[in-house]
Structures are given as C-alpha cells and as structure tokens.
Image (tube, rainbow, N blue to C red):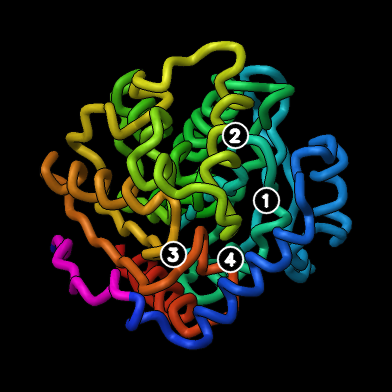
Amino acid sequence: MSNLVLDPDVFDAASVAADTRMVNDAVVKALRKVPDLWNTPLPQMRRERLENKGLFPLPPENPKALTDTIPGPRGPVPVRIILPEGAPRGVYLHLHGGGWTLGSARENENLTSRIAANCGLAVVSVDYALAPEDPYPAGPDDCEAAALWLVKEGAARFGTTRFAIGGESGGATLAVTTLLRLRDRYGLTPFAAVNLTSGCYDLRMTPSVRNWGELPLVLNTFDIERFINYYLHKGGAPDHPDVSPLMGRLYDMPKALFTVGSLDPLLDDTLFMANAWLAAGNTTELGVYPGGCHVFISFPCQIADQALKRIDAFLRDF
C-alpha cells in the first residue's frame, strides 16, 4: 500500500496544537540562550551530552542494553543491542541522527527501547564514525559493515532473517545510503522495511533548508551547512548518490515509512524522497505532522505520540 495523499491543513498554522507550540517555543528559547553553540569543541559537546549536561535531557538508560562491537573497515564498530521480551520477531538496524557529527546509540535509547518493547524486535543501534574527525565515507562505511554483519550473523545471533533498517535525521540519510550500497555493491536486498524520520537526502540543500533562515528550532540553515561541511570536508560530492541518496536510482527498495514535521527545515527532503521512492515502484507511506519540529518524535507532545504509534504499527507489520 502506498499513501502519499496529504491534507493541506497539515501546513496551516491553525492546525498546530497548543502542546506542539509549547514544545517549539521551549526549544527556541533554550537554543537562543546559547548564542553560538558551535564555539563548544565537538568532543566536549559529545561528552556533555552523554553526561546529561546537554541542552536536552539524556533519556533513561535501558539496563538490559548490551554493548558489543562488530568488524568494521577501520577497526571495531561499537553497537548497542536491545532485545525484546521473548524471541525476536525480527531485527531493526538503527542509525542515530546528529548531522553525521554528533549523537550516539545511547542518546536514542528512548526510541530504540520502545521499538524493542512494542514491536518485538531486537534493535542493533550503530555508533558509526563521526565527522569531522572521521568524515565521509567513514560513517557510511561503518553502516554498510553493520548491515553486512547482520546479513551474515543475524540468523545465528537473533534467530531470524527478518530485517528492517531506519534512523532519524542524518541516520535516515545513512539508512538509504546503506540500502543502495548493499544492492549495488553486493546484489543484496535483505531489508523488508525502512523507517525514515526527518532525513536529509539532498546535501546540495533543498529549498526548505535554504529558505529556513536563523530560527533555531532544533536546526537552522547555518547548522545544516555546518554539518554538511564537517561531513564532506575531505571529499564527497553533494550531487553523488552515495552522499545525497535522492540522486540515486531507487528501484528495488523496501517498503518505507517517511515521517516529518511541517516545521522541519528538512521538510522538502522528505517530501521529495517519498515521492521519488513511490515513483521508483516502491511501497511508500508518508506522515507529515502539523507544527512538528526536526525529529519532533523525541519531544513530549500529541503529534509525537501519534507518529510513534504509526511507526510501531509499521515495524510490527513488515
């Protein structure tokens, strides 16, 4: 089933719920208190986030989460594994967001724990290499390695070959890149579903990114430019499909659920990619949520609950 029919009201300011407005106002207020967030060295920023000293709270740690490593092209790649109660119905390969520069599996434990519990899936979240210390293609290489490891070891490790993949923001970008690499480099299409939230699929920057401006609603135009520059500072052309998967040939892709808020600078990326996915002959679902900021599913509001329930249903049914 493909469902890309949108109610125009999702883009109407009058459709934005009061609690969504409150979340957005709080995010902007918090970020405006830090006039130049980029003055903080990235290693310090990453450390503070893991110490729960960042701008947004660190989610509770899942006491059952397992830390492991898998073989990667430059050495071991850390992964964080969360198992459901009982035998896994499948495995979800999760790629976290953070502009290919920040973020970690641990920081997404609220989302990955939910998927394990609600969908009966083992979740393998990958701590891929981050820019600018390890710029493109290091991150995609690690994600490719993780996917190949799952294809090889998944049945023995988890008792299933039913696989899904997904991520948020830059992790959604890497999820699509990984699917394209597996198909084109190895002739593999092992994933039956892909869950993509607030992805950046065109690093040339879509109109919604270019026209967003300075408003710090999680991200603004300058932040996205900075992330792209860090990611590609040692090579990688923004118009190459391995960098901007919207430029890729999207045939033989798994069924996809695209999720985005109407107040996300990366709105166009999702709208363009979802339509390209459908046009390439793939089963496609799209959810656009009124007033949702970038990766709004991480914030407490009704539209986050709605989107997460839809993601749960998608990952239960693939």
Q: For the residue labelled by badge 1, is the local secondary structure a helix, a strand or a loop?
A: loop
Q: Which mark is residue 89?
A: 3
CB within 8 Å, label 4 to label 2: no
Work out whether mark 4 precedes mark 1 in sequence or the reverse, and give the earlier one: 1
**Which percent across, then down, holds residue 151?**
45, 37
* Camera-nearest residue between 274 and 282: 274
Q: Quadrant of the N terminus?
A: bottom left
Does 297 sit above or below residue 229? Answer: below
User: How many numbered circles are shown?
Assistant: 4
Q: Residue furthest top?
A: 235
Image quarter of residue 259: bottom left
The verdict on residue 3 being magenta is yes
Magenta segment, principal secondary structure? loop
**Disc 4 residue crowd, few under 14, some 14–19, many 20+, Cα 10 Å:** some
Q: Which residue is mark 4?
A: 111
Residue for point 70% across, 59% down: 31
Residue 105 disc label: 1
Q: Which mark is residue 315?
A: none
Q: Earlier in the sequence, mark 4 or mark 2?
A: 4
The answer to whether marks 4 and 1 mark residues whose Cβ atoms lie closer than 8 Å is no
Q: Is residue 170 above or below residue 255?
A: above
Q: Work out how far the residue at label 4 is from the one at label 2, CA to CA, in angstroms.
A: 23 Å
Look at mark 2 in the image and give the residue it sits on. Answer: 227
* Residue sitting nearer the eye, 318 or 51: 51
Q: Which residues are magenta?
A: 2-12
